[in-house]
Amino acid sequence: MAAHLITGAGSGIGAALTEKLAERGDELWLLARDARRAAELRDRFPGANTLVGDLGDPGKLSWAFGHQALPVTLDSLLHVAGTVELGPVGDLPVKAWQETLNVNLLAPAELTRLLLPSLRQSKGHVVFVNSGAGLTAHAEWSAYAASKHGLKALADALRQEEHANGVRVTSVYPGRTATAMQAKVHQQEGKEYDASRWIEPASVAKAIIAALDASRDAEITEITVRPGPGAR
């Protein structure tokens, strides 16, 4: 039975991924921002373990984990949580940049650092759910795209550093996916949101699991997922 630590398990891609891993009986460790959210996750996913740590304040993650029991071995660390704030460079305040970089880049880096001993123990797998914005930046997406470009750099460096330790690293680049975040993006863009036009979260979850289940002689380094012809 594989053990996975998942961020963003409460909604969207993270929830779909957690459901699929729970269905096959894997051991789940779910990160929650506070005790109330942790209780909600345990109710939703019976048998799951929870850890409390605020991705918006990555400098305190080490302290928070120091007061909790961490998994001794970990087969995968799945960075799914994210946040987005759109706006022109000329209008985005420092606070928006800091919040975006904290959640999307600094927290994944710190979580990875803290959990590497457990991942090395089991020759585990780190998956970063990135975005098409991690490959191309468009107008009004500067903070989000910068965080996701940085996440790609983090993954690429980590892959080279941990290869000798048997730790695999995968970046996943989903296109627009039918999640609460996508609804927020449409609101910020002033556009009508139609979930049927975009990728189902479960489809991205299946791609992530395919990378996790790859045989040990292979490392799937990057996966790009785009809305298919079935989307309208």
Image (cartoon, rainbow, N blue to C red):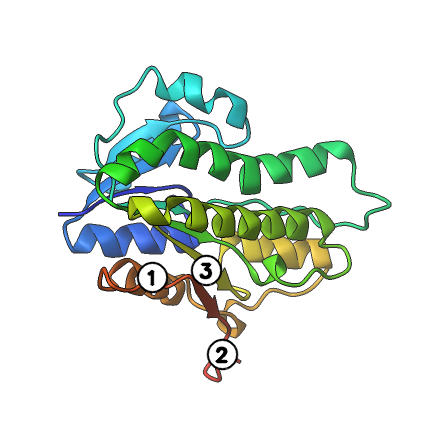
Instruction: Give the alpha-carbon distance from disc 1 to disc 3, as whole Å.
Output: 13 Å
Instruction: Name the residue type under label 3.
Output: Val
The picture quadrant where one finds residue 139 is: bottom right
Q: Earlier in the sequence, mark 3 or mark 2?
A: 3
The residue under the point 66% across, 53% down is 145
Q: Position of residue 193 (x, y in %)?
A: 60, 64
Task: Identify the residue position indicated by label 2 in the image.
Answer: 231
Left or right? Give the position of 7 relative to 68: right
Instruction: Name the residue type under label 2.
Output: Ala
Left or right? Give the position of 137 relative to 41: right
Q: Does the image show residue 80?
A: no
Q: Earlier in the sequence, mark 2 or mark 1?
A: 1
> Does residue 118 sit above or below 124 in this rendering?
above
> Does residue 99 sit above or below 69 in this rendering?
below
Q: Position of residue 27 (x, y in %)?
A: 19, 42
Left or right? Give the position of 185 relative to 209: right
**Labelled disc at residue 202:** none
Q: Nearer the viewer, residue 122 or 161?
A: 161
Task: Identify the residue position indicated by label 3 in the image.
Answer: 172
Instruction: Give the alpha-carbon distance from disc 2 to disc 1, as whole Å.
Output: 29 Å
Instruction: Name the residue type under label 1.
Output: Glu
The residue under the point 30% across, 32% down is 117
Task: Identify the residue position indicated by label 1 in the image.
Answer: 219
**Label 3 SS:** strand
Label 1: few (<14), some or many (≥20) within 10 Å? some
Q: Earlier in the sequence, mark 1 or mark 3?
A: 3
Label 2: few (<14), some or many (≥20) within 10 Å? few
